[in-house]
Image (spheres, helix red, strand yellow):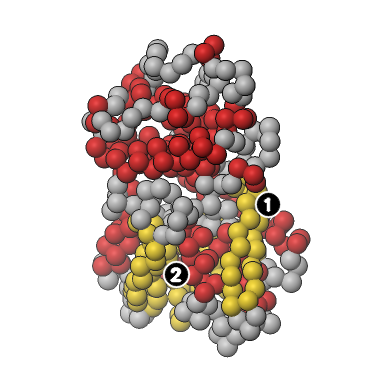
Amino acid sequence: MGVKARNPILPSTSLPCLRGSTALSAAQIGAALRNLHRLYCPLPTSLDFHTVSKSRLTAPDSGYASEADIDDDDSPELMRRDEFEREFARRWLTRFIGRASELSLDESISDPFVDEACSILGFLSHRVEDEPVGVEHLGMTREFAFSFENEDTAKIRVELYDTPMQTGEDHTDVGLQTWGASIALSEKIAKEPELFRFTDDVLSSSSRIVELGAGTGLVSLFLSRLMPHITEARPAIFATDYHPTVLSNLGANISSHMSKTPNAAPIQACHLDWSAPSLDAPLDVPADMLMAADVTYAPEHAVWLRDCASLLLGDGGVFWLMVSQRPNGKFAGISDTVEEAFQDKERCRRRDGKVLTIASVQQVAKKGEVGRADEIGYKLFEISWS
């Protein structure tokens, strides 16, 4: 399907008022989000590929000014870099996400709108001065810095390639983006490594750390560079995922990472399907630690993770799972499915009688604009054999 190209319009002059959001039509909202997407992340928007009731998402006349009405000086590049317009768009998107539940639309229509708004808001969280001029945003190299205080305060920096959500049709490729929970988990480990058992007396070069649903690999890349600050040992890190495109991007991020820091702990990208996990090498040896951040998007995911962890986690090991809390939209209540999955003790029981159990749950606050706009915080689960 082709995507019709149009010049974007200034947000301050085109976005509909949200005060009467219940009266807004799907066509008005769809047109507003398409305009913002064209301006701030010029890729095909998920709404352009959405097949459900497409006629309800498009209108012959959105009420916007025509291209002929746009001043020649208002080029898309100048508009995109205008900080006033960016802030106006950020505020509108944040309000829209917060009031989406008030829309008089079916969830099959409103949920894709919320996803699209969150995706655009993610683009707007980056500083405009960090973005190259005149370059189409097919992806971006992002740098993250985490403060680690040991004998000396060190900045652990991680670079990776990140791709925005594009079509909305394939939900298994969400690993092409770096999500807020992986940032929050990395920050918490940097501040409290002992809590996670990242200490010199626990770690060894035979230790095995497996990340489930690694995505772009932020947590694994961070742990790889953290290790030299903690121990002389170099535990083996295995970053796993399912989607071929995600694995390709993950592998590229790992190669770049290891070429720049050869003394870091080694990382290997591996395929893993939670619904049918395989214990083929290199996952044939029990893991001392499992890590996962923001990997539950459907009720069955928590069950798959539980069963997968039962196969992979060794005696005395621990599974750290951070789940995003999203109270509205199609992901509402998903964070509660983890507790529900582990309530069935018989499903969690091994043949030797040991039970995979949630040992503790911590609430982790969301910081600033990190993460999707519909996230209110995170739950950190400590899961182990008992």
Residue 58 position (above or below residue 136): above
The residue lying at 76 percent from left, 61 percent from top is: 259
Residue 121 shows in this picture: yes
Amino acid at pointer 2 = Trp
User: 144 or 210, which lies in front?
Assistant: 144
The residue lying at 39 percent from left, 13 percent from top is: 61
Residue 159 position (above or below residue 172): below
Residue, disc 2:
320
Residue 325 position (above or below residue 19): below
Residue 75 position (above or below residue 89): above
The residue lying at 64 percent from left, 60 percent from top is: 158
Q: Which numbered tag is attached to residue 150?
A: none
Q: Say what secondary structure mark 2 lies in.
A: strand
Q: Within the image, what quadrant is residue 207 found in?
A: bottom right
User: 184 or 67, which lies in front?
Assistant: 67
Q: Within the image, what quadrant is residue 41 found in?
A: top right
Q: Residues within 10 Å of mark 2 (few under 14, many from 20)?
A: many
Amino acid at pointer 1 = Ala
Q: Say what secondary structure mark 1 lies in.
A: helix
Q: Which numbered tag is attached to residue 252?
A: 1
Residue 298 shows in this picture: no
